[in-house]
Amino acid sequence: QAGVFPGGRQKTSQRFPPGFRSAPRPSHGMARPTPPSQSCLKALPAKSVQDFLSAVQECRLEQAQEALRQIRAAGSRRSKEAFGGMRAMLHYYLESSATLNQVAQALSFLDELKASSDARLVSSAAFNALLRGLLSRSGFEEAQWLRNEMLRFGVAPNEASLNLLMDTAARSGSHLDEAWDILEEMQKQNLKADKYTVSILTKQLSDRISDKRRVPRGVAMVEYFLKTQPEDVDEVLVNSLLDVFCKLGDMPRLEATLDRMREYGIRGSAVTYGTIVKAYGRAGNIDRVLQAWEEMQAEGLEANAVTYGCMLDACVKCGHLEKALHIFAIMKQRGLHRNTILYATLIKGFAKSKDPLAAKNLYREMRSERVPCNVVVFN
């Protein structure tokens, strides 16, 4: 430890987490932070502002710091407009620093600000700018470390900070447990979670449905989100949750989610009804399969190839070959039938109903349509 500032606050030259100094700079193709608008910088010295913007855009961060020091020294920052401009420039610098893997340098500059008359610039919003930069390159370990640094600066993470951390963890793919931990923390504090991140997490639950420890915990938190943030619930989130319940075979919770969707006035899509049809097909409930199909048509929704496939599979699973063939005939009219899985599903249905002649005729049709056969078809 290199020492402390007056008052016991530790300097930023302590050890940083692995990768802070050694990671390569991002390629030119990586998305870069958006500069502040010129309208909010009018109260600041034009020459220094231009020097600052050019320095950041050319990745000359030390020169950008110097330009910020010159603006602070000019004294015009004391007006409300000038302070707002200074804050916007600082946040742009911080986000760019994190994107370019220069967090240590950025924290040193924040230390300098904290010890000056501009200490109020060192806020949760400033650290959120750093977090946004880390999010752009999925640096979750660094983001977690930065959260601890906020406490060293006497800054508490706010709702936006936790959402950024959760989003970084969710998108990393390797820190899903941490993402759920952050969501749980936010819910305990009655903070609003970002609906897009919750949708990502819910989709990942569906992809890991066999995980008997994580899935029940995640489902409980998503259901709590539906209950406490109704204004943020949309069709994408509902569809992801319905798919989880479909794979779990949990029909009571699937129906409860559908009731909540209707209560919130969310209109289902062809994807929604495809999932419902698939779930009731797996449950062997042909009446509810047909009811869902009729509801979709009554809503004026046009089935796509996936929805037709779900309906076909559900009818076959429930032993309703007649309805399955009717659906398949509609698909032929629309040119959506040339698919190996669809033919395999129908052939399997004929095999179960002990109708080998119909199965063989369908196989011949499949060959004449030049649809590839797979192992399921031959079996």
Image (cartoon, grey):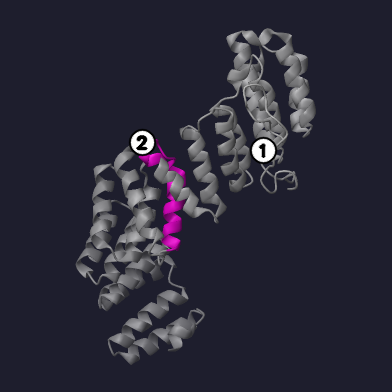
Name the residue that disc number 2 marks: 190
Amino acid type of the residue tagged 2 in the rendering? Asn
Depth check: give the residue in front, 125 or 153: 153
Q: CA distance from mark 1 to mark 2?
A: 29 Å
Q: Residue at x 60, y 17 (%)?
A: 84
| Residue found at x 28% / y 69% | 281
Q: With respect to residue 20, does 175 lie above or below?
A: below
Residue under numbered circle 1: 98
Quarter holding the C terminus? bottom left
> At x 33% / y 57%, what residue is drawn?
242
Q: State left or right for residue 286 relative to residue 118.
A: left
Q: Is 376 or 2 nearer to us in this picture?
A: 2
Task: Look at the image and tell me in which quarter the N terminus lies.
Answer: top right
Category of crowding for the residue at label 2, using alpha-carbon neighbours closer than 10 angstroms: few (below 14), some (14–19), many (at least 20): few
Asked if residue 30 is positioned above or below residue 353 in the image, the reply reads above
Is residue 333 covered in magenta?
no
- Which x, y percent locates residue 42? 66, 13
* Amino acid type of the residue tagged 1 in the rendering: Ala
Give how far across and how far down residue 23 sits, in percent. Answer: 73, 48
**Mark 1 or mark 2, which has the lower sequence index?**
1
Q: Secondary structure at mark 2?
A: loop
Outermost residue on the left side: it is 287
Res 266 seen here? no
**What range is drawn magenta here?**
186-208
Circle 1 — which element? helix
